[in-house]
Image (cartoon, helix red, strand yellow):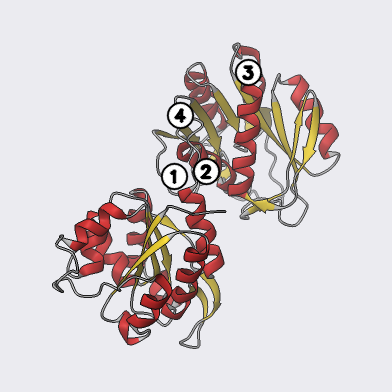
C-alpha cells in the first residue's frame, strides 16, 4: 500500500526495542511516507540519532530547546505536520505521561499537541505491561482513541518470556497503513451492532451463558466508526473497551434485555449487524436464594425459549435497511445458515464453524462464509478486523443495489 504524500512522526523511546524502530523507519520511507523522528534522551542511549537521520533524511529532534533550522515552534510545527504519530517502542513511561497529560520533553510535548491519529507499539517487561497502573493507562489511552499494536508474546531481552515484546515492524507498518488509508464511505449512515454473550440467571450467583468474547462485534463496530458511520453498539458482558468513535454504547445482560434494546434502536439504523451470541433458553424460574446441593447428585432446570431477536427484526425490516446475521454452527454450517437467512428475512449471513481452529470463540481470527440469496463467498482465515471490513464492504454493496 502506498503512503506517498503521508507525513509520519516516529517517536522513539528508551527501550532495547529501539533498534526495531530503525527497520520501521525504513519501511515507512519505502512505502512513500515522509518521516520525522523524535527521540527521547534515553532512546539515544540505545540507537544513535545519526542512524535515524540517515534513514529518514531529516535531522532527528531530541532537545526541546535546541535552535531549529527554521524559525518555528518545533513541537507545534511537527504536531501540525503529522498525519500519523507512531510511538515505537512505547515504554510504560511514555504511556503514563500521555495518559496523565505530562509534557516534560520534546516527545511528550509534541504528542500532547498532536491532533492526528496516534499509534502505540508498547515494549516492556511482562511485569511492567501487566502492572495494573500500565493497564489502567492503556485503557485510558484506548478510550481516547489511541490505537495500539501489540505487545506480542515472546522472549524478552531481560530473559523473561511473556507479553511485552514489541510487534514486528511489518505489523506496525500494516497498522499505520490501515489508519492512513481509512475509508470514509459510511459517513452519514447509522449502523447498529450487537455483540458478546448474554447471561440467563439461575439464582443470585449462577447463570447460563456461552464462550462469546464479543471480539467480532466490537471489530465491526470499530471498523464502521472508522469509516465514518454513526455507530450504536449493544453489548452483553465482555472484557473489551468500547471502540473509539462509537457514538452510543448500551450494556445489557440477558437476552430479553438485548431483545428490548435492539427493538428500541432498530428503526433508526440503516445497517444492522447481529454478531451477538444470545442464549437461546432461559430458566422458567429464577431462585431467590442460592440453590444448595440436594444430596441426590442431580439438579433439574426447566428452560423456555428466549425471544428470537433476528426473526423479530427481520419481520420489522423496512425498505433500505440491511440486516446481517451470524450463524455459529458445529455441523452442516452452510445448510443451517441458508435456512436461517430465509427464515429470519436476513439480507446476508456470515456462517462459521466454531469447531474449526481459528474460527471459534475468544480468538482474534475467524473463518466465515458470506451467504446471500444470490450466492455465497468463502473467505480464508483472517483477523477479525479484516473480516469486519469485508462484511461492511458487502453490506454497503447490498444497500446500493
- Residue assigned mark 1: 243
Residue at x 59%, y 31% (from the top left corner): 273
Q: Is 401 in front, or is 35?
A: 35
Cα distance in 3D space between marks 1 and 3:
27 Å
- Residue assigned mark 4: 187
| First along the sequence among labels 1 and 3 | 1
Quarter of the image with the C terminus is top right
Q: Is 192 in front, or is 78?
A: 78
Cα distance in 3D space between marks 1 and 2:
7 Å
Q: Nearer the viewer, mark 4 or mark 2?
A: 4
**Residue 228: % across, % down:** 45, 34
**Residue 103: % across, % down:** 18, 64
- Residue assigned mark 3: 312
Can you tell which mark lies on residue 63? none
Dots 1, 3 in contact, CB < 8 A: no
- Asked if residue 308 can be seen in this view, the reply is no
Amino acid at each position: 500500500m502506498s503512503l506517498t504524500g503521508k507525513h509520519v512522526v516516529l517517536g522513539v523511546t528508551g527501550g532495547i526495542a529501539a533498534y526495531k524502530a530503525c527497520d520501521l523507519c525504513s519501511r515507512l520511507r519505502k512505502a512513500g511516507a515522509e518521516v520525522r523522528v523524535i527521540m527521547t534522551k534515553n532512546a539515544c542511549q540505545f540507537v544513535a540519532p545519526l542512524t535515524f537521520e540517515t534513514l529518514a533524511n531529516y535531522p532527528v529532534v531530541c532537545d526541546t530547546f535546541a535552535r531549529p533550522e527554521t524559525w518555528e515552534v518545533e513541537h507545534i510545527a511537527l504536531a501540525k505536520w503529522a498525519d500519523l504519530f507512531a510511538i515505537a517502542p512505547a515504554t510504560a513511561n511514555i504511556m503514563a505521561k500521555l495518559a496523565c497529560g505530562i509534557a516534560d520533553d520534546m516527545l511528550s510535548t509534541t504528542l500532547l499537541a498532536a491532533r492526528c491519529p496516534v499509534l502505540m507499539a508498547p515494549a516492556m517487561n511482562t511485569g511492567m505491561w501487566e502492572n495494573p497502573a500500565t493497564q489502567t493507562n492503556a485503557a485510558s489511552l484506548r478510550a481516547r482513541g489511541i490505537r495500539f499494536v501489540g505487545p506480542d508474546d515472546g522472549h524478552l531481552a531481560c530473559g523473561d518470556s511473556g507479553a511485552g515484546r514489541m510487534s514486528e515492524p511489518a505489523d506496525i507498518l500494516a497498522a499505520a497503513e490501515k489508519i492512513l488509508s481509512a475509508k470514509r464511505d459510511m459517513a452519514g449512515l447509522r449502523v447498529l451492532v450487537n455483540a458478546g454473550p448474554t447471561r440467563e440467571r439461575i439464582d443470585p450467583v449462577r447463570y447460563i451463558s456461552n464462550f462469546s468474547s464479543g471480539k467480532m462485534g466490537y471489530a465491526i463496530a470499530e471498523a464502521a466508526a472508522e469509516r465514518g458511520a454513526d455507530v450504536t453498539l449493544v453489548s452483553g458482558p465482555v472484557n473489551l473497551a468500547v471502540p473509539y468513535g462509537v457514538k452510543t454504547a448500551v450494556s445489557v445482560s440477558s437476552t430479553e434485555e438485548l431483545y428490548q434494546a435492539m427493538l428500541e434502536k432498530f428503526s433508526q439504523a440503516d445497517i444492522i449487524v447481529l454478531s451477538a451470541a444470545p442464549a437461546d433458553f432461559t430458566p422458567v424460574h429464577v431462585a431467590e436464594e442460592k440453590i444448595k446441593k440436594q444430596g441426590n447428585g442431580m439438579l433439574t432446570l426447566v428452560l423456555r425459549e428466549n425471544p428470537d431477536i433476528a426473526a423479530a427484526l427481520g419481520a420489522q425490516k423496512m425498505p433500505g435497511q440491511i440486516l446481517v446475521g451470524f450463524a455459529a454452527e458445529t455441523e452442516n454450517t452452510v445448510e443451517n445458515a441458508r435456512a436461517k437467512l430465509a427464515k429470519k428475512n436476513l439480507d446476508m449471513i456470515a456462517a462459521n464453524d466454531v469447531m474449526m481452529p481459528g474460527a471459534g470463540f475468544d480468538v482474534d481470527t475467524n473463518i466465515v462464509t458470506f451467504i446471500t440469496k444470490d450466492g455465497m463467498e468463502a473467505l480464508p482465515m483472517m483477523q477479525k478486523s479484516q473480516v469486519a471490513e469485508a462484511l461492511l464492504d458487502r453490506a454497503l454493496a447490498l444497500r446500493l443495489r
